[in-house]
Structures are given as structure tokens and as C-alpha cells.
Amino acid sequence: MSDIASAYARLIEANWPAQLPREPFYPIGKVPLTAYLRHWAKLKPEAPAILFYGTEISWRTLDHLSDLLAALLAREGVKPGDRVAVCLPNCPQYTISYLGILKAGGIVVPINPLVKALEFAHYLHDSGASVLIVQDRLFETAAAAGLPACVLVTSLSDFLPPTPAYAIPPGLDAPRLVPVGTRDLLQTLHAETARPPNPALDWDSIAALNYTGGTTGLPKGCVHTHGDKVYTAACGNTFLTIGSGDAPMLNFLPMFWIAGEDGGLLMPVVSGRAIVLMTRWDPGATLAAIAHYRVSTVHLLADSAVDILNHPEARRTDLSSLRDVTVSSLMKVLDPELRRHFRALTGCTLREAAYGMTETNTMDTFTYGFQNNDRDLAADPVFVGLPMPGTVFRITEFETGADLPFGEAGEIRIHSPSLLKSYWNKPEASAEALGDGWLHSGDIGRIDEWGCLHYLGRRKEMLKVNGMSVFPTEIEMLLARHPAIAASGVVGRTDAKRGEVPVAFVRLITGARANADDITAWCRENMATYKVPEIRLVDTLPMTATGKVKRADLAKLL
């Protein structure tokens, strides 16, 4: 072990929160995800596993329906290692499909429901999926992409109760469609009579191909095992949900996205806790669901936390059940003021959730224990905390791979139990990313005097202004603290004198009266001179499905 690595380990040891264990907790050990489902179905069969707008699906029912799907898939010729694509928004059928595919020994291929036909075709053809489970209303897009031999469709309304417990989003109760050449998923399952297969699954069996966002070329499938999934869930349950007991969790993040899969499926299945599942973000419905189901754990975007604070029902809603509320700072950033207002409303202290990426199943750090006197927020706007047990970071020079001293910015390299095993059918890309056993993330970060990681952005996005390194992510997070700014995206433009100049495309909060000059003056008071961006006000920003600004699209506006 190098001197830097040894010193890093000592820092983590010295600053580990006293309230936290040193290892993730596995309720029944290091076994496949399907074993956890069967365990809870046997231990508490009638307890709710999924809560969906008033419908309760028990662990017994979830186990039974996923068994039926496994039997159906086996009868359709799906063998261990075969890929099955799932293109669904958040709904009980997503969880049933995911677990049923695993029980058949198959590999889950989540597909973003927002993609167009050309992108859809890439997922299907790259993975070689032989079966597709798709929402009925998305069938036309799938058909234009070229369908596999077996297509099962399902409607979002299938699990809605006659009278929902709270407001449902528009379209959720749309009538069922069964296009020609397809079969209705639930009707087919209820007619299934075969016994489910019993493939020999273990910790190292491949569970899913989670596709990257495609920031460099077409999306690549990250090969993740049952072990990756269960380790991630155990870490999340141990280090992100502190003191929540067995009360329900709530998830609105899309489960085709790795963070939504973690919070909406993996963590509940491993912990045996019920998940309140929402098809999309709605602050009023979220408030009602928290009160109705006595939710204790929810992960929000910082923007979502603001939506809750500003909702007219917030102060009339019983939120006393909340114990753990974490956030991700994407467009809006967690700051002391947001934390103070949210604590006054709920009694909960908002914490930044975790750093991560699809390649690592996206739960690599935790921030619990650094909230006293806003220690985490005072550090800088990109504090992401200590590594999960078993996960190790290095900060290195991009070109040489040499370790850099603490405090210096360089490439974040990661070694983790949940690290992807390869990119699907991409040996050259796999060797480039994982050649020395460490993931070369392409992210820039630094490690501070507490052993905590700070995320500064992507290398390809870093700007050089008068020879100084400027990180668009840092500027965006600083801009998010301006009271009139709803969102921003920062890119660089070439400048003959300064090399590059940061340009911030800014969307104001509705009704805000600030202009570009006002914001520039604020930036000069709150940023180093070389970081102050040019301000361009816009009505909208180009966004990805997972809530990130499309910087490539912004660059075209320069």
C-alpha cells in the first residue's frame, strides 16, 4: 500500500461517524437478490411489498407473480444468461418483471421510456434481447425500432384501485391497449400453469445490463451481478437510511435510471421494507402519500425539496413520520437555507445522498455524520462524503496515473465491490476503463483533510481560463444559491486572450426580476474573478431524462 493510500485509510478511520457500523448489513447474507424476495415472502407473506396509489401488493403476491413470469419466460425459450428488455415507467409491473427475469436466470435490460425509435433499437440490438416487456402506450416506438419475437405489453392502470388514495398523474388511468401481435402481461401470467425454473444463481451471476447515459458515443451496457446489486442495496440501507426502522420508503425516481432502481427496487427487496411507488414527481401527491402511508424514508432532488416547501398543503400535512430525507443536487443545490427551512417543516436534516455512476451502481459515498454546524455544506458546494465500506478512491494524474496529494484535483479512480464487470460486448472499452482493476471514471475530484471526496465535474467539461482550471459543475452549484435562479448550465467558449471563458445559460424562477447584470454582479461577489461567467438568460434548458443539463446542446447555442 502506498504512503498516500495508507494516509487515506487513516483519515477515513479517524473521521468515521461514531453512530455508524463499519460494514454493510446483509439481512440473510451475501445471496442473490431473488433469495431475498423468497425470504420476505416466507417470513411475512401478507405484509405489503409495494404500495401504489392505494393498492397493496404483498410479498407473497410479488413472489408469486414473479414466479409466474419466470415460468412464462422459460416456456418462451429464455435460458440463463439470455437478455430480457423492460421499457416501463415506475409501476408494480416493473418490479415484477425485474424479479421474474432474474428468477428465470435472465439478464434485465432496462430501457428509458422516453427514448425514440433509433435509440430504442440500439438497446435491443446491442443487448440481443429476445423478449420485450413494454408499456402499451410505448408500443409504437418499440415497433418502429424492430421487435423481438416475444412482446408482452402492460397498462399503467392495471394496478390502480377503483378509488385511488390520493391524486394520480394524468394518463395513469388510460384504458388498456393490446396491440396486434402482443400479449397482455398480467392476463398471460394469470393463465400460466407451469412451474418456475430453478437456475443456479449465485453472487457472481449477471443480473442486469444497465446502460450508461451515452455522454461519449452510444450508451454502453454495464454488466452488473447479483452481488453488485445486493452490496449496493445493503450499503444504502445501512448508511443512507439511518433509524427508519421498518416504515415504508418512497420512490419517484425512474427505475430505468440506476438511482431509481437502487431506491425503488433493490433497497426495499434487500431490507424487506415496503416501497411507496410513484410514477413521477408530484409534490402534492408526495405529501399525501407520506401522510397516508407514514413514510419514513424518501430521496429527493434538491428541486423537489423546494417544491415541497412551496406547496400550499405542506404545513397542513402530517410529516412527522419522516426520519431520513436525502437529496441529490442537480439543478438546485442543497445549501444551509434549504436545510434550515426543511428542518423547520419536517424535523429532518437534509443530507446529500451519494456520489456514483452507472458503472458502480451509483452509491459509492455517504455524507451522514457531517451535518453538525453545516460542516458538509461549508466545505464547498461539491462535498460527497466518505466512501462506502469496501469502496476505495484514488485521485490521480490523468496521463500518468500517479497518485496526487490530498487537496489536489485529478481523476477519480474507483475500486468497489459493485464495480461493473465489463461493458457488454465492448472489450476495448472495458480494457480502457478497467485495465488496472480501477475504474477510470473521467470525473475530476479531490480528497480533503477528512478523507471525504469532493466532485468537481467531468474532465472533458473542465475549462482553462487564463491557465486556471474552472469546473462547470462548481459554477452551476454556486449559481443555484442565487435566490432568483431556477437552473443553469455552464459551457466554455474559446477566447483569444483568456483561452476559454465560462458561459452560463440561466433560467430564472417564474416572476423573478433579476437581469444578467444583476447576476453578474452577484457572481463577482461570490466567485473568484476567473470563474465569473458570462450570463445568458434563457426560458428553457435542454435536459436529459435523469435531470441533467445537456451541455452539448448548450454549446451549439454559443
Image (tube, rainbow, N blue to C red):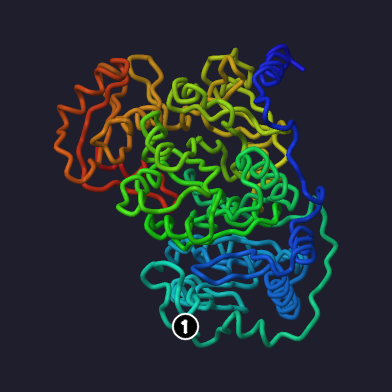
Closest to the observer, 523 or 149: 523
Front in this rendered view, residue 90 or 551: 90
Residue 68 vs residue 492, the one in the foreground = 68
Q: Quadrant of the N terminus?
A: top right
Q: Tell me what residue is drawn at x 34 percent, y 54 percent.
A: 313
Q: Is residue 415 left or right of residue 221?
A: right
The residue lying at 79 percent from left, 59 percent from top is 35
The quadrant where residue 287 appears: bottom left
| Above or below 258: residue 80 | below
**Residue behind mark 1:** 176
In this rendering, does residue 241 appear at all? yes
Camera-side residue of 288 and 84: 288
Residue 502 position within the rendered picture, expressed as x and y whole percent measured from the top left:
30, 27
Left or right side of 272 for 518 = left
Tell me if residue 438 can be seen: no
| Vertical comparison of 88 with 465: above or below | below
Residue 412, image x, y percentages: 58, 28
Q: Position of residue 213 (x, y in %)?
A: 50, 49
For the point 39% across and 47% down, which residue is it? 304
Q: Residue at x 62, y 79 (%)?
A: 150
